[in-house]
Image: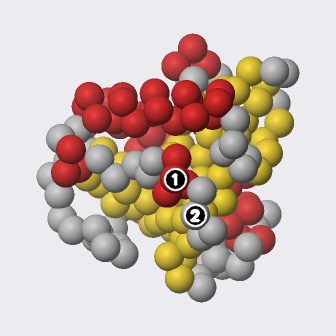
Amino acid sequence: MKIVVDDLSGPEIARFLDAHLRQLRSISPPESVHALDLDELRRPEVTFWSVRDADALVGCGAIKQLDAGHAELKSMRTDAARKRSGIASRLLGHIVAEAGRMGFTRLSLETGSEEFFLPARKLYEKFGFDYCEPFADYRPDPNSVFMTRTLAGTPGV
């Protein structure tokens, strides 16, 4: 498996992200879907990674800079056929390390509160994310959960 920075120019990643957005919109009400679309992911404050296994796109994730020391984890997705195969853990470890190398001292995220998102919340807990209040422009939402972790002093970061 290779994790690479992706410029989001290929049709394969566009389809992958479109499926991600459609799935999230089928689970959560529109006002509670905070996923970025392709144009938003291409903004300069976003770094986006794709995960490839041989020629297959099997996952993706991104961080969005909120300020000089704080970034938000965005667009974490694993291909449905490859869930529970370690892709998400490997990618999240990579993103946490890269965020630290980029000089961020805090990494936060928003994810769903529904049962569907429980495996994601467990993964984030495993990587040291703690539950927190809404950050940045988020507001309290019964369909959202907010998590954060510090990066300063993190081994390997």
| Residue 65 in sight | yes
| Residue type pointed to by label 2 | Arg
Few, some or many residues within 10 Å of mark 1 (<14, 14–19, 20+):
few
The mark found on residue 121 in the picture is none
Q: Is residue 38 above or below residue 56?
A: below
Which residue is labeled 2 in the image?
43
Is residue 107 found left or right of 153 in the rendered image? left
Q: Residue 38: percent from the left, percent from the top?
A: 52, 47
Q: Residue at x 81, y 21 (%)?
A: 55
- Quadrant occupied by the N terminus: top right
Q: In the displayed image of the protein, which residue is found farthest to the top?
A: 81
Is residue 70 found left or right of 144 in the rendered image? right
Q: In the displayed image of the protein, which residue is found farthest to the bottom?
A: 68
Q: Residue at x 15, y 52 (%)?
A: 142
Q: Residue 99: percent from the left, percent from the top?
A: 68, 66
The mark found on residue 39 in the picture is 1
| Residue type pointed to by label 1 | Asp
Numbered disc 1: secondary structure:
helix
Name the one closer to the observer, 116 or 150.
Answer: 116
Few, some or many residues within 10 Å of mark 2 (<14, 14–19, 20+):
few
Q: Residue 75: percent from the left, percent from the top?
A: 51, 46
Name the one closer to the observer, 8 or 29.
Answer: 8
Q: Is residue 111 above or below residue 64?
A: above
Q: Residue at x 55, y 28 (%)?
A: 15
Q: Residue 62: percent from the left, percent from the top?
A: 60, 53
Distance (Cα) linking label 2 and label 1: 7 Å
Q: Is residue 28 above or below residue 111?
A: above
Find out whether the residues at labels 2 and 1 contact each other: C-beta distance under 8 Å.
Answer: yes
- Quadrant occupied by the C terminus: bottom right
Numbered disc 2: secondary structure:
loop
Q: Is residue 27 above or below residue 120?
A: above
| Residue 122 in sight | no
